Amino acid sequence: MTDTTEGGMLDLYSFLGDFVKKGALETARREGLYGRSVHIFLFDTDGRLLVVRRPKTKRYYPSKLTSSAGGHVEEGESFMEAACRELREELGISPPLTHVGRFDVVSSRERTIHHLFSATLSAQRLDTDPDEIAEFTRMPLSEAVHDSQQHPWRYANPFKCALKAYDYYLGKRMWVLDFDHTLFNWYGFKKDLVHELQYRLGVPESTVHKAQVMCERSSLYSFESHLQTIAQVSKVDLSAIFGIRDQMEGRLPEYIYPDARIFLEKLKRSKQRTLLLTYGEPTNQEFFVRKTQIHDLVDTCEFVKKKSEKKKKMRDLVRKGFSINIVNDDPTETELMLTGRWPYAFVYLVERPNAKYTRIPHCSEWEVINSFDEIVL
């Protein structure tokens, strides 16, 4: 929970998170810039929050109660990396973290963008740093909120703001999920379709791919049009191809990635809000979503014709005050959704076999994961 960098200088950023310069707090106030910090709420297995008392030697908020851990984000760090580092330095632990949301504190003492994280504390021993933690206690979250309201002078101001943010984001977190390649194994499905057409009807793989290109060029791509074009190019009876279509339709639920299904089931049990947002020919997308039965595991499904419409939807969610977590396999598509940098979204990029994995969207806090199992709810 370092107060400032050496010499009272801070790394200063724009509201959207772009590094601008090093400077003092006075510079931040004068030029409308911000420092960056993290707060971590640690809960024990009984749901009690670990509350820390700052040492009396601290420049800011001496002897005040504050978050379980926290501090400034160093230059070149993401908020997640900073949170992990602060936990190691202050408490000697490295638990999996959940991103809760962003809140800003602007006062005579600071101008700071804060990101709040949470984690569950195991029974392991805490190796506390005496320069950062004078003592700690555990209390129910409701008690911490109530006491901070009744006796506000006992608490550091950013911690009081963090308590309000945590309560707010509990009901305002939205998971925005991509479908193709993220939840649905499109490559596996297409591979099996090619196999069925090739070995049951003698349709060459090259014909399947040629038909797909023809459909995409005409802007009419859908599963139905793809099969019809295959019949046209290969001279195979359409009814025979549709017979394979009917067989493949019955197997579509099998092509939802197992880790994705488990993750969605956990989300549903946790009652967090979910939006399946996918683009393409709407009728085609709706067909696959319905046949895979994935719509039963999400709150809302929306189908848009253009990637740019995803960006509009994201803006609508932000205006409604949601803290957004995006899960997608395609960093280019994700960056387009968040063009102009996005201060209220956290991105999980899922690395899938054969996915178009080209670059990381610099417009948001992000984490690359190999499996949905790595996301902590």
Image (cartoon, helix red, strand yellow):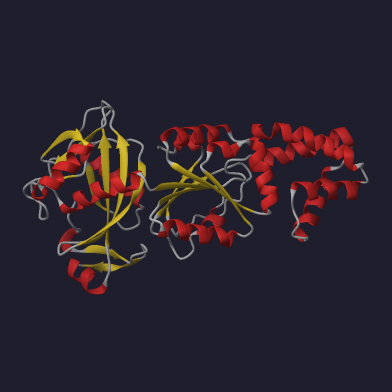
Asked if 359 appears above or below 177 in the picture, the reply is below
Residue at image position (23%, 69%) is 28
In this picture, residue 320 sits left or right of residue 38:
right
Residue at image position (8%, 50%) is 153
Residue at image position (19%, 43%) is 145
- Identity of the residue furthest to the bottom in this view: 30
- Identity of the residue furthest to the left in this view: 56
The image position of residue 186, as x and y in percent, is 67, 42
Q: Nearer the viewer, residue 215 or 292?
A: 292
Q: Tell me, yes or no, if residue 158 can be seen here.
A: yes
Q: Tell me, yes or no, if residue 1 can be seen here.
A: no
Q: Nearer the viewer, residue 280 or 122?
A: 280
Question: Residue 363's image quarter?
Answer: bottom left
- Identity of the residue furthest to the top in this view: 123
In this picture, residue 42 sits left or right of residue 8:
right
Residue at image position (82%, 51%) is 211
In this picture, residue 298 sits left or right of residue 224:
left
Asked if 27 appears above or below 17 in the picture, the reply is below
The image position of residue 141, as x and y in percent, is 22, 38
The quarter of the image holding the C terminus is: top left
Exactly how many numbered labels are in the figure?
Answer: 0
In this picture, residue 210 sits left or right of residue 38:
right
The image position of residue 140, as x and y in percent, is 21, 34
The image position of residue 82, as x and y in percent, is 31, 49
